[in-house]
Every structure is written in structure tokens, then in C-alpha cells.
């Protein structure tokens, strides 16, 4: 129930705005707002990534994983999200073996 309360409002908001965005996406002001929003979101994601990375990398294996993910992110143009999930599951399985 809590997950629904967290994610439902934003999904409803996005669904409602999509209808109007299609109509007004050619307006210069809307284009500028979207460009600025993209820059802000990119900055926020980068900041959180660095903060989490610094606080979570305590071992050589963790640092190696961070380097591999960074190389993949910079070299490969489009990585499907399921590949990251599968990679994390594989890493966790290898890491947790006795």
C-alpha cells in the first residue's frame, strides 16, 4: 500500500501531462523548460550516484564493480535496464557464495 501511495501520484501526473505535452511540445517555452528539467535531473542523478558510490564502496570487489559499471555506462550507448538487474543478481550470487 505504501508503494502505491509513493508511486501512484507521479504516474497519474505523468499520464495527465502527456496529453498536453503532445499538443504544446513545439512551443519554444515548453522546449526550454524540458531542456532545463533534463539538466536538473541529470545533475541530481549524478550527485546521488557519487554520494552513494562513496558511501558504499568499501572493498576491492566493490570498487571493481563500480569501475566495470562506469566503463559500460560510458562505452555502450544503450544498455537495457534488465541487463543491469541481471548483472547485479549475478554479482550478488557470486559474492554471496560461501
Image (tube, rainbow, N blue to C red):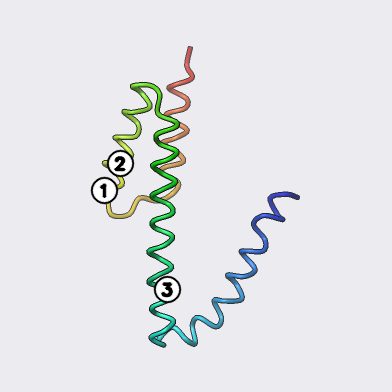
Image height of 11 relative to 81, above or below: below
Q: Mark 3 — residue?
A: 34
Q: Quadrant of residue 9?
A: bottom right
Image height of 65 relative to 42, above or below: above
How many residues crowd around disc 3 within 10 Å: few (fewer than 14), some, or many (20 or more)?
A: few
Q: Quadrant of residue 34?
A: bottom left
Identify which residue, 20 or 39, lies in the foreground: 39
Instruction: Give the mark nearest the N terminus, 2 or 3.
Output: 3
Query: Of the residues tagged 2 and 3, which is closer to the observer?
Result: 3
Q: Are marks 1 and 3 in contact (CB under 8 Å)?
A: no
Separation of marks 1 and 3 at Cα, in angstroms: 24 Å
Instruction: Give the mark nearest the N terminus, 1 or 3.
Output: 3
Separation of marks 2 and 1 at Cα, in angstroms: 6 Å
Question: Where is residue 98 shown, x and y percent of the image?
Answer: 48, 11
Label of residue 87 in the image: none
Q: Are marks 2 and 3 in contact (CB under 8 Å)?
A: no
Circle 3: element type:
helix
Residue at 37% in and 64% down: 39
How many residues crowd around disc 1 within 10 Å: few (fewer than 14), some, or many (20 or more)?
A: few
- Left or right placement of residue 12 versus residue 93 in this view: right
Q: Are marks 2 and 1 in contact (CB under 8 Å)?
A: yes
Q: Quadrant of residue 90?
A: top left
Circle 2: element type:
helix
Residue at 44% in and 35% down: 88
Q: Residue furthest top?
A: 98
Label of residue 70 in the image: 2
Label of residue 74 in the image: 1
Separation of marks 2 and 3 at Cα, in angstroms: 26 Å
Question: Where is residue 32 shown, x and y percent of the image?
Answer: 38, 78
Identify which residue, 39 or 98, lies in the foreground: 39
How many residues crowd around disc 2 within 10 Å: few (fewer than 14), some, or many (20 or more)?
A: few
Residue at 26% in and 48% down: 74
Amino acid at each position: 500500500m505504501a508503494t502505491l501511495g509513493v508511486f501512484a501520484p507521479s504516474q497519474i501526473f505523468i499520464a495527465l501531462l502527456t496529453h498536453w505535452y503532445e499538443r504544446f511540445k513545439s512551443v519554444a517555452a515548453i522546449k526550454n523548460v524540458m531542456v532545463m528539467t533534463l539538466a536538473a535531473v541529470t545533475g541530481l542523478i549524478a550527485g546521488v550516484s557519487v554520494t552513494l558510490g562513496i558511501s558504499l564502496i568499501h572493498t576491492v570487489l566493490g570498487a571493481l564493480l563500480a569501475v566495470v559499471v562506469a566503463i559500460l555506462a560510458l562505452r555502450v550507448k544503450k544498455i537495457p535496464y534488465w541487463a543491469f538487474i541481471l548483472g547485479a543478481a549475478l554479482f550478488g550470487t557470486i559474492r554471496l557464495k560461501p
